[in-house]
Image (cartoon, helix red, strand yellow):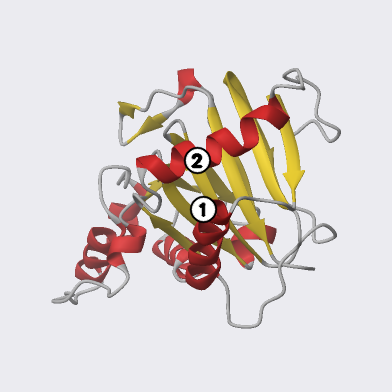
Amino acid sequence: MADVLLRRFLFFNLSYSRKCIILKALRGGFATEASSNVDLLSNVSFLTNDCTIEELEAVQDMVSGNLEVYENFVSEEEEDRLIKEVEPYLKTQKYQFDHWDGAIKGYRETEKSRWTDDCLRVFKRMRDTSFKPNTKLLSHVHVLDLDGNGYIKPHIDSVKFCGPTIAGLSLLSSSVMRLIHEKYSSVTVDLLLPRRSMYILRDSIRYEFTHEVLEDKTSRWKGEHIPRDRRISVILRCQP
């Protein structure tokens, strides 16, 4: 019976902690305390399509600990400094609509190894929050600039270019990232990335889920349109 109920239930209106409570209630138990990391998962939403409890829980288990969002990770002033730092490099390029592997439309990008002290302080905070001690990062910080009409299509990251953890800042615009596991495709994981937030993707999230950034016309979170304007992401990556 619980399995039938779950197959008919859409989870896009519930936070991760609420979903855990519902699942335990369906199984005859009840959770009296929220997960200790609920704040880091409050921007995660699950949409199911004829899946079982076991399939949903398998996806939630992979998400827990491997996917985090920190709202307001940088201040308005820090965002402004970061944008001023990368804008001169980006302005020398035109937006491209044919990525080398077809994964991105309407983008320009650069990699930088030299930054102002103000930016380096932000990166230190990102590193301390996102990576294990003594993790070696790639020396160049990746900067991806999406046009207001641009988007990232579903793809899985290659293991050749960076290691199991990335941490990215979402600047200038909020957006919705969508992740779908190769095996459990009946569960869609939507990730709300507010402007000035930091997201962290680790391990199975990187290599077993496709991920995409939705274009403006499909950018929705729990039924609400999340306007997508120009978006710049600044990404730290560990070595392969």
Q: Residue at x 42, y 66 (%)?
A: 57
Amino acid at pointer 2? Arg
The amino acid type found where label 1 is placed reads: Asp
In the picture provided, is 130 more to the left or to the right than 145?
left
Per the image, label 1 sits on a secondary structure element best described as helix
Residue 219 against residue 141 in the figure, above or below: above
- What's the distance in space between the residues labelled 2 and 1, CA to CA? 8 Å
Residue sitting nearer the eye, 151 or 108: 108
Residue at the extreme bottom of the image, as rendered: 134
> Marks 1 and 2: in contact by CB < 8 Å?
yes
Q: How many marks?
A: 2
In front here: 172 or 154?
A: 172
The N terminus: image quadrant: bottom left
Within 10 Å of disc 1 (Cα), the crowding (few <14, some 14-19, many 20+) is few
Image x and y of residue 54, in percent: 45, 67
User: Residue 107 location, x and y as percent?
Assistant: 69, 26
Nearer to us in this view, 167 or 152: 167
Q: Which residue is mark 2?
A: 81
Kindly identify the residue that appears in the image at 30 percent across and 30 percent down: 223
Q: Is residue 217 above or below residue 168?
A: above
Residue position for label 1: 118
Quarter location, residue 225: top left
Asked if one can make out residue 1 in the rendered structure from this viewpoint, the answer is: no
Decide if residue 93 is in sight here: yes
